[in-house]
Amino acid sequence: MDQSSNAPMHLCHVNKLTIFINRTYTVIYSVALSFLLYYRASFFFHDTKTPILPSLIVFVAELLSSFEWLLTQAYRWRPVSRTVFPERLPEDDKLPAVDVFICTADPEKEPPVEVMNTVISAMALDYPPKKLHVYLSDDGGADVTLNGMREAWTFAKRWIPFCKRYKIKCRSPKAYFSAAEDENEDAALGVTDFIRERQIIQEKYEVFKERVIEYARHSDTGSSKRRGHSAVIEVIQDSSSNHAFEENEAKNMPLLVYVSREKRPSHAHHFKAGALNVLLRVSGVISNSPFILGLDCDMYCNDPSSARQAMCFHLDPKLSPTLALVQFPQKFHNISKKDIYDSQLRETFTVLWQGFDGLQGPCVSGTGYYIKRLSLYGKSLKEDHKDLMELRTSVGPSSEFIKSLLGNYNPNMKMAQLAETQQLASCTYEDGTKWGEEAGFLYASVVEDYFTGFASLHCKGWNSVYCNPPRPQFLGSGTTNLNDFLVQGTRWSSGLVDVAISKYCPLIYGLTKMSFLESMCYGWLAIFPICRFFSLWCLATIPQLCLVNRISLYPEVSNSYFWIFSFVFLSSVLRHLYEVLTTEASLQHWIYEQRIWMMKAVTSHLYGSLDAFMKKFGLREASFFPTNKVDDVEQLKRYNAGVFDFQTSALFLVPLASLVILNMASLCVGIARVIFLGELEKLFIQGFVPFYVVVVNYPIIEGMLIRKDNGRIPPSVTLLSAIASIIFCILGSIIFM
Ligand SMILES: O=c1ccn([C@@H]2O[C@H](COP(=O)(O)OP(=O)(O)O[C@H]3O[C@H](CO)[C@@H](O)[C@H](O)[C@H]3O)[C@@H](O)[C@H]2O)c(=O)[nH]1
Ligand SMILES: [Mn+2]
């Protein structure tokens, strides 16, 4: 390791050409948009024949989507990418310690074998074992998880040395053994010892897996257990010994700790943020590492080098004083070539986060980040932390924990500390403290990651970086059916809109606390669900209703504004296509995104926004239903074949189907008018809107009218939707006439 040289541990690349293209586009498109909005606005003064209401609604929709578009330009202002040189890090004994936090909540939706694979992969990170501590938070309080951890520990004692000896890259045993040989890039392939040993380990893995499955069969995984149970904290170790730290050192094993916080139905538990805060406290009195790797239970380490890669930034003296976290992208192991739901979240992790990175850095993205512990303690530490009384009111009464905060702390576990963890994980510990408001992960939104990154980190002067190396460092399971996808999208929208309509709205609160462009990025995330559901609902109904009622909303072909509208539409579509193609996705994927973007806007974004408003007015309670990580064989088959699976709630299906029916009907009226009245020139744009909606959403039509399998849209839903769109059409006509 060359420590003496001054070579940098990381580089940041600014792509000048991309920046030039992006900024030029922003300018040209802004001009076109201004003309478009001018056309609309002047319409109210000149045209007195046309009813005002439809034009007004369309105008508001256009204003909102223009505003949304403007905010996204911040992400295009200065995208950067980064390279790291972990080989230039200091010696192992100079590396800081890392605590890994893994959260699981429900053994039925999150298969224990997979969760254990994540645990094992984290234990096998390429990092000094003495400096690695893995904590699993189990909100399900399930026996299978605790027993699974004990089994995982035993298996890891064989697995870790094997991985290290043969430099295995993929350290989740499940992923490793299920990959084809050439995918694993095994350096020692062909060496007889290696082949023999791999065989033995594979058998051990099968035994381990069977035992966990067996536990799951007999374990109490009922929902009553999930809602209420006492705290269980256990350092996993061999039953014969009684000092985990010394023993681990001898065996070159990282520390492994099971944490199931106390939960009572009478106490709000604040979902994942609550779980993470318990982990912060419990780990504080056990290992108290200065850095934390946050992982979801399905996100296994696909490459052991992530900790070292992250340290390339955290140990850079120039960056480190203000650097709160290094974020890796979320990537998924189960993405189909025909990713019809855009489960890979392409735009977020290939375009937006790079743009964020060129400013003050991306927000915390839930999983796959290395964060500085100190940055999470909020106000309590940045200000004078010698005032003990104030610390007590802020982080609670535990003196062991306060000792850990003050830094003069020797992380050497004693029984007393372990007893202290019971108190730290109890559901009353946070009463009257600042946990969730200033300290730790924040509770005000179910997208705790986004909100914490915003209010606790970037607003307080911390920065972050985004590291997206060619080999994915972490791989999780993406959603593979429409239902999970829309439910997840609804939760995200709800959590984001929570922030938009709170006093923390980034477009106001953020302006004085961070750079203007950074607050635009945060602002876009908070308000896009509202903008999109509103503008999409309007554009999917108003021009169509007007077409049926012979009200004209757009300029005729002969009008010069026709070209403005055409340019705005075509260039945005082509711009999207360009981004899709330059981020290694296919032409087909571009259509998938256009479609799922519309589908999400009229369902998830709508319901999420409503949910947020209802919570605000006290009409609903916050909820967090973990995403299902168990694949239904049939649904998975459809996803892989690129066929929509419409087995989801009618709440999602009816809006989708009704809107498509309405658009089909208005398209027919439009065609009739063109044929019989020769109104092509007059109707071009207004007829094109439903045409585009129908073409892009063809799978919905197929699901209603053509398919006969289980995944189609049930006839009853189609009927209901048809009735809904007829009623809508009649009501609309009455209002607009
Ligand atoms: O009460 C809860 C609910 C969830 N979780 C865990 O939180 C993680 C994320 O939940 P998941 O169901 O996978 O939700 P996703 O929508 O896939 O998660 C994304 O969005 C969340 C915010 O809504 C972020 O916290 C996640 O990191 C991010 O991956 C999982 O490990 C869960 O076990 C808990 O620990 N306790
Ligand atoms: Mn997830």
Image (spheres, grey):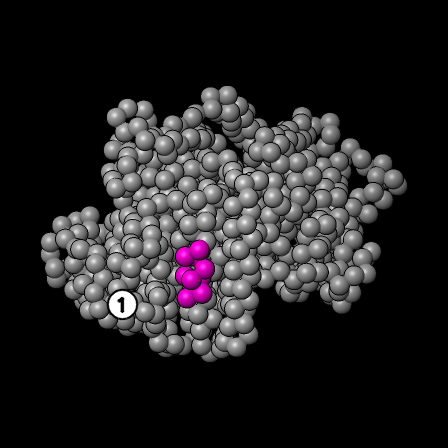
Q: Is residue 649 above or below residue 119?
A: below
Q: Which residue is rendered at x = 41% and y = 41% of the image?
A: 305
Taking depth in this image into account, of 361 and 506 the one nearest to the observer is: 361
Which residue in the protein does label 1 denote?
A: 242
**Where does residue 631 sit, x and y in percent of width and height?**
62, 60
The residue stretch that appears in magenta: 149-158
Q: Which residue is rendered at x = 54% and y = 72% of the image?
A: 214
Tell me, yes or no, if residue 649 can be seen here: yes
- Residue furthest right as drawn: 676
Tell me, yes or no, if residue 623 can be seen here: no
Looking at the image, residue 316 sits to the left or right of residue 123; the answer is: left
Q: Which residue is rendered at x = 56% and y = 47% of the image?
A: 195
User: How many numbered marks are there?
Assistant: 1
Taking depth in this image into account, of 724 and 341 the one nearest to the observer is: 341
**Where does residue 295 sit, x and y in percent of width and height?**
42, 53
* Dot 1 amino acid type: Asn
**Where does residue 604 sit, x and y in percent of width and height?**
57, 56
In terms of image quadrants, where is residue 607? Answer: bottom right
Mark 1 Cβ inside 8 Å of ligand 1: no
Taking depth in this image into account, of 100 and 514 the one nearest to the observer is: 100
**Where does residue 159 sit, x and y in percent of width and height?**
45, 53
Locate the N terminus and report the quarter of the image it occupies. top left
Q: Is residue 232 magenta?
A: no
Q: Is residue 46 above or below residue 479?
A: above
In terms of image quadrants, where is residue 446? Answer: bottom left
Looking at the image, residue 249 sits to the left or right of residue 621; the answer is: left
Q: Which residue is rendered at x = 38% and y = 76% of the image?
A: 229
Q: Is residue 455 above or below residue 464?
A: below
